[in-house]
Image (tube, helix red, strand yellow):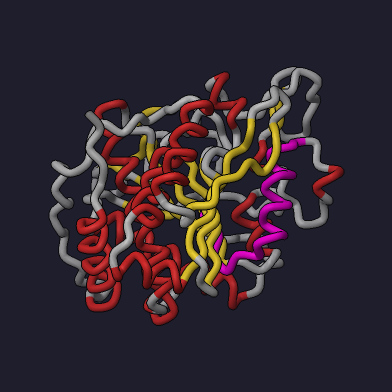
């Protein structure tokens, strides 16, 4: 039997987060105990794309019209790229997961987020949905997931970013100057079109990295970064840093994790940079691939960030965060274990 996170706990989480975010100074933040895990286990970390479609259809049914499920296009192998929208508020958020096929854990987190926000129907749920609209690309790279590799699937590929005979690195093909119809990576083109139609204020991209230690020898559970391309306006960099602080506070103080900055590049084809250049507060989140025994905790951690970013956008508390707190997040330290997923955001 699958035990699902329940709305009341989501509400408690969001409330606790708002308190954490607003009242705890960055320097003096206590090491809070992780939330109890008894209400969360047995989430499938790697549902097939068929299963994702089935689960989303079930959520659409249970949501009584509050969750709008669609495919934003097909992959080279003919799989649908599933997306779902919830809420009808003026603040627009886009969450994208699993651009890299072998970085799976953002996808089940997104499914549980949609379940919580779209199926639950208390006063809090109604309030949240009246304040924000969240559009979720639930799995950007279904072919890469099926092949358990980073790239999309394209045997004809001879890419600048990707691997010849294998496929394109989707997260290098979001260049604002590249029209979707000219994009050699169809999944990136689908996301470009979904982005242009939605124009989100906030865009968060979920990935996975290898294992690292901080300077004190404690394992890093997730890393975060805002746009670093020099063309992104300072106001949008600050807006992205505020969202980064929300995510960091959530992971460090609610999910029991340990966040660092992510050492990402400036290239404009990376979603984090591209959607910053196009006008969003754009943030990258990299969950560490800590092994099978940590997967439920990592899924829950991403799920809590999805909730927290929506909550703090809805109540406006994110706007009151000092963006300099993001600069104070420590850098990522030494690798414990190099893994295949670890090739940049
Ligand atoms: Zn990645």
Q: Is residue 24 magenta?
A: no
Is 300 in front, or is 63?
A: 63
**Above or below 228: residue 207:** above
Can you give x and y, in whole percent of width and height, for residue 227 in the image?
59, 61
Name the residue located 68 percent from the left edge and 24 percent from the top edge. 153
Split into quadrants, the picture shows ligand 1 in the one at top right
**In the picture provided, is 197 more to the left or to the right than 284?**
right
Q: Is residue 209 visible?
A: no
Can you give x and y, in whole percent of width and height, for residue 343 in the image?
55, 34
Is 129 in front, or is 23?
A: 129
Name the residue located 69 percent from the left edge and 30 percent from the top edge. 75
Question: Magenta-highlighted stretch: main secondary structure?
Answer: helix
Quarter of the picture containing the N terminus is top left
Can you give x and y, in whole percent of width and height, for residue 197 in the image?
70, 60
Is 285 in front, or is 1?
A: 1
**In the picture provided, is 277 more to the left or to the right than 138?**
right
**Above or below 249: residue 258:** above
Name the residue located 69 percent from the left edge and 64 percent from the top edge. 277
Can you give x and y, in whole percent of width and height, for residue 127 in the image?
37, 72
Please identify the quarter of the rendering in which residue 266 is found: bottom right
Name the residue located 25 percent from the left edge and 75 percent from the top edge. 25
Quarter of the picture containing the C terminus is top right
Please identify the quarter of the rendering in which residue 172 is found: top right
Q: Is residue 240 visible?
A: yes
**In the picture provided, is 190 more to the left or to the right than 249?**
right
Magenta range is: 185-204
Q: Is residue 199 magenta?
A: yes
The residue furthest right is 182
């Amino acid at each position: 039997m699958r035990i699902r996170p329940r709305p009341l706990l989501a509400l408690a989480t969001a409330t606790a987060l708002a308190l954490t975010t607003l009242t705890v100074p960055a320097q003096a933040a206590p090491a809070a105990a992780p939330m109890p895990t008894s209400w969360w286990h047995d989430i499938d970390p790697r549902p097939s794309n068929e299963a994702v479609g089935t689960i989303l259809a079930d959520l659409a049914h249970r949501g009584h019209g509050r969750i709008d499920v669609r495919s934003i296009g097909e992959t080279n192998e003919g799989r649908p790229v599933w997306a779902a929208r919830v809420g009808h508020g003026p603040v627009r958020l886009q969450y994208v997961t699993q651009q890299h096929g072998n970085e799976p854990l953002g996808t089940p987190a997104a499914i549980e987020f949609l379940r919580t926000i779209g199926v639950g129907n208390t006063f809090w749920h109604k309030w949240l949905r009246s304040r924000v609209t969240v559009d979720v690309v639930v799995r950007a790279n279904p072919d890469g997931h099926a092949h358990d590799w980073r790239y999309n699937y394209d045997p004809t590929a001879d890419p600048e970013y990707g691997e010849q005979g294998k496929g394109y690195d989707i997260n290098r093909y979001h260049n604002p100057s590249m029209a979707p119809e000219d994009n050699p990576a169809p999944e990136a083109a689908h996301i470009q079109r979904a982005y242009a139609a939605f124009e989100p204020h906030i865009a968060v991209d979920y990935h996975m990295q290898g294992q690292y230690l901080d300077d004190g020898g404690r394992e890093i559970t997730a890393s975060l970064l805002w746009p670093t391309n020099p063309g992104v306006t300072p106001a949008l960099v600050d807006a992205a840093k505020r969202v980064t602080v929300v995510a960091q506070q959530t992971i460090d103080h609610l999910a029991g994790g340990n966040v660092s900055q992510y050492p990402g590049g400036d290239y404009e084809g990376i979603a984090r940079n591209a959607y910053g250049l196009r006008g969003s507060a754009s943030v990258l989140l990299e969950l560490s691939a800590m092994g099978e025994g940590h997967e439920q905790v990592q899924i829950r951690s991403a799920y809590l960030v999805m909730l927290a970013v929506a909550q703090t956008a809805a109540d406006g508390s994110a706007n009151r965060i000092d963006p300099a707190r993001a600069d104070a997040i420590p850098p990522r330290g030494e690798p414990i274990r190099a893994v295949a997923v670890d090739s940049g955001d």
